[in-house]
Image (cartoon, rainbow, N blue to C red):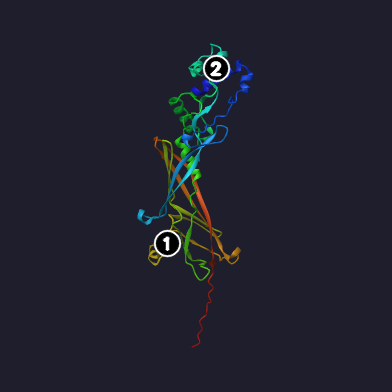
Amino acid sequence: MRTRKIHGLLAAVLTLTSALLITDSPHAGQADVAQSSPSAGVSASGDGGGSIEASVTVTYASPGSTPTSQTVTSSTQVVQVPPSCGYKPTYTGPEIAEIYRNAPESAPGLKPLYADWEDHAEDTNGQWWRSYCDPSVFPDVQSFVKAQHEFVNNNPTVIWVVADDTPPAPHVDPATLATTVWESVSIPAPAIDYNPKIGDSQATIVGFATWIWTTNNTPSRVEIQATVGSTSVTVTAASNKLDLSAPDSEVDCTGFGIPWTEQNDYLGTDCMIMFTRSSAHLEDSVTPLDISVLYTASWTSSTGQTGNLTPLTTTTTTSIPVAEIQTIIVQPTDEP
């Protein structure tokens, strides 16, 4: 790669120069991290690192066969996103001038890198900044290679930043932005209701088909819109089923269930669970019911890039009292 070749040449020249110069330089050997830039909404970390504030809007849509039957809620927040590519400080004017004055003429490609080094040779306040891309913030190697290729081809390798001026704002790759906001946003855990509910304990019955359905607190669809500078992404996540698990029964629902009503009783539902034992032998006399929702997610971006994200499962446990109805069977007699 172009940057790797340049860095290799610079390393070779530094080997030939004074070891004291290299050791004493406050920026030599500094890790590839982004420098804070007030214009980019970056928070400084003291060593040149930082994170960029992404404006995020999250929209939750509850289960429903039509948009009018859904409950839609939105919220806004700020998410810290690590820069993908940008510039980091390297040398002052006198430092790079000393390197050039001691550099052998046989080092091809080195001097064009800092072509105007003489213009800043005596400037101790300004600084040279070098481009970088940080592989650790990308979701995969392919995303890193692509982003690095585009950044190197569209931006200079080194730039001079005058004293008290701000360097170019760091760049956030769409794949990194999408992955970060997807991992940062908390999707509400599923909440359910059930039927029947008998007596003060609101118990269901052993051997009876208990209807289960989610309430409006449980999203079936999530849309996340995030923006950093001129880069924006839309993450869309959806689920179409519930997984129910009790100590004595397991059910996979198609959909999120429907509330029980007398009218819906004729329509039926496949989101039912049947308990085979009462809760009398369990702690607090209730049966734990685990509910899981699996969300698959993908993203699109203002750059035209798209991708898929790691699926996410939300879970919760609801305690349901399960009662057993005792019946007395009377044997008929022949007595009048």
Q: Which residue is mark 2?
A: 97
In the image, residue 110 lies at what x, y percent?
Answer: 51, 17
Tell me the kind of residue under disc 2.
Answer: Ala
Tag on residue 74? none
Q: Secondary structure at mark 2?
A: helix
C-alpha distance separating marks 1 and 2: 76 Å
Q: Is residue 118 at all visible to an observer of this figure?
A: yes
Q: Nearer the viewer, residue 307 or 234?
A: 234
Disc 1: CA contacts within 10 A as few (<14), some (14-19) or many (>=20): some
Tag on residue 259? 1
Q: Residue at x 55, y 15 (%)?
A: 100
- In front: label 1 or label 2: 2
In the image, residue 116 lies at what x, y percent?
Answer: 48, 17
Q: Nearer the viewer, residue 272 or 263?
A: 263
Q: Is residue 273 above or below residue 47?
A: below
In the image, residue 233 lies at what x, y percent?
Answer: 42, 40
In the image, residue 325 lies at what x, y percent?
Answer: 53, 71
